[in-house]
Amino acid sequence: MQKSKLGISVALIGAALYFIGLFSGYVAIVLLAGYVLLMEENVWLKKTAVKSVALLIFFSLISSVVGLVPSLINFFDDIINIFGGSFSIWFLTNIISVLRSGINLVQTVLFLLLGLKALNQGTIPVPVVDKMVEKCFEQQG
């Protein structure tokens, strides 16, 4: 099992990247990914660092885009409230709520599975993100 410069296995750092992304958010994962990209030489670990950050950003973007619809509805409701009325589309708001819950569920399951797979230096293909990661590493090498 290959060791990192920290003296722990590369696989454990890879798993930590996914678990930190799941449980801690941006600051911790960016710090660990930054360390990996600057200090470590293992290509699998570097790709894992980029993939974990990219996945976190990907899910945040999807959630934000889906969340625009209720925000837009609330905006119109606020404008109509000025004149004493109200505006809502409950059916659409409920569908968006279900979608956001589904996105969060997929994110949680994916990060857990990726973290467990990383313990054996494996991965789970995520085509959109994997393609972007490979593009980043093609330009370097």
Image (spheres, rainbow, N blue to C red):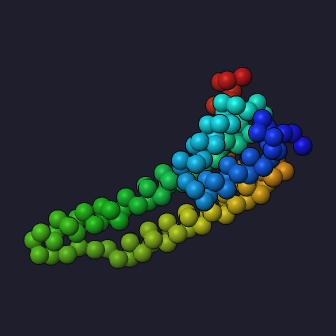
Q: Quadrant of residue 71?
A: bottom left
Of 99 and 22, the residue lying toward us: 22
Q: Quadrant of residue 136?
A: top right
Q: Nearer the viewer, residue 63 or 52?
A: 52
Question: Quick check: 4 above or below 20?
Answer: above
Q: Is residue 94 left or right of residue 50?
A: left
Evaluate whether residue 122 shows in this view: no
Q: Residue at x 50, y 67 (%)?
A: 99
Residue farthest to the front, as pictured: 7
Residue 95 located left or right of residue 80: right
Q: Position of residue 139 (x, y in %)?
A: 65, 24
Residue depicted at 22% across the width and 69% down the height:
77
* The image quarter in which residue 106 lies: bottom right
> In percent of the image, x 67 and y 56: which residue is there?
19
Give percent across and percent down for residue 130.
67, 42
Is 83 located above or below residue 14 in the figure? below
Q: Nearer the viewer, residue 77 or 116?
A: 116
